[in-house]
Amino acid sequence: MVRSSCFSGLNPGRLSLALFVLTLIPALPISSLQAQEKPYFVTYSHDLEEPGNLEIETKTALGRPADSHHYGALASELEYGVTGWWTSELYLDGQTTGQESTLFTGFRLENRFRPLMREHWINPVLYVEYENITGADKNMLEVVGHDGQGDLAELNADTRQEHEHEAELKLILSSNLKAWNISENFIAEKDLGHEPWEFGYAFGASRPLRTLGSGKPCIFCLEKFTAGAEMYGGLGDVASLTLADTSHYIAPIIGWQLPKGRLSFSTGFGLNRNSLDRVYRIGWASELPQISTWFRHNGGAR
Amino acid sequence: MTPRNCRTLGLLCLFIGAALFLGAASSSPWAKIPAKDHARTSPLTSRPDSVSAGALIYKENCEQCHRADAMGDGHKKPALRTERIKSATDGDLEWFIRQGDLGHGMPSWSRLPEAQRWQLVAYLRSIQ
């Protein structure tokens, strides 16, 4: 098979539209993002969105399954802090595959709750998500069951016909210890149609490169960078709770906090033959502070 | 809807309900500061740059709610120039910043490294 270049087969009109939308983001009344947000792409820590804030985040995954075309998948995320212990999110997913097509692949609604009001050595968070996506989704926001690169190699024309209504539960355990964050996620996902429960995991650890604030507004100070790694993969399903035919990744990550947002990057390395060789991820997050005050007649901060 | 879907939906409702119930059950954390934390002193008191560093951390993380003058919004976002804060120990303040008050909208700032929380304490002290 002739290898395509990364962007061959993309629709130039759609690409231009996507770039135009991205250029609008800096024009929004965005504040500096809160310090030390974790740069994970798959793993969740116990950090929730601050109440009243709206975070806009994009996560892009670039990969190429064996004997198939390059693809780029974009998940756009709106995350709102409802209370100090409850964060709600909407994801809009899409993907484009070289020499095939560009698709909107569905949406996800998720909620995260902190059941314990105090900070502990290990802090649990309960995660509930509803997904309405097609089989063409390639964002890999989690890896469960027997997910593998074979699923990502199927033709868009076929997979777009598969509609999946899924519920996903996660138990998030997370600790902030000596400037390190260590997070463990245990995932259970259920296709509400006919599939069995599938399981997966994600672990992450990260740390700012400098813990003491320099006291100067700066872009390249070490405290603006957070480095770490995450590991994630599938654990089979109810019928076969096994590592056989599952995929697993380990991914060094780096996050860079900029005045108007946070840039994150990771390269995931597949750990077995069922995994992609590499998956590159790029994330950008910006925050709109206290948007609830925008709609008040009195007391608005703006 | 099949019985299996009903079970799944029921499980989801139970999950959400438990989280909401536990989340709502909260009380003021000021009264619960452990003696060990109350007695802690800032390790950065000898560093003169702590206040300016804390000011920047405040600007990046706290100002959006508590305002630039730290007087809050007079409503849900409280002022930070108060007798309660003035009389609190360094340890009390660091503990409160770390714990937050999730039930009343104050996030936990355990995500900030401990050194930066102490810098923030130094800044809060300086504005009283």
Image: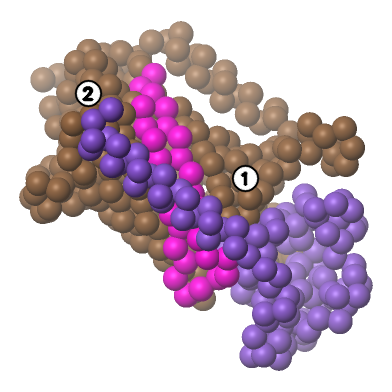
The quarter of the picture where the N terminus of chain A appears is top left
The magenta segment is A104-132
| Image position, residue A125 (x, y; %) | 46, 58
Rendered location of residue B55, percent (x, y): 80, 64
Residue type beneath disc 2: His
The residue sitting at 87% across, 61% down in the picture is B79
Task: Write down the chain letter for disc 2.
Answer: A
Q: Colour of chain B?
A: purple
- Give left or right: position of A138 versus A257: left
The chain assigned the colour brown in the figure is A
Q: Secondary structure at mark 1?
A: strand
Magenta stretch encompasses residue A109:
yes
Predominant secondary structure, magenta span: strand
**Residue at disc 2, secondary structure:** loop
Quarter in which the C terminus of chain A is drawn: top right
Distance (Cα) linking label 2 and label 1:
40 Å
Residue A241 drawn above or below residue A124:
above
Which of the numbered marks, if any, corresponds to residue A82? Answer: 1
Q: Is residue A196 magenta?
A: no
* Residues indicated by labels 2 and 1 sit on the same polypeptide chain: yes
Name the amino acid type tagged 1: Val
Asked if marks 2 and 1 touch (Cβ < 8 Å), the reply is no
Residue at horizontal 58 percent and vertical 55 percent from the top: A85
As drawn, A61 above or below A53: above
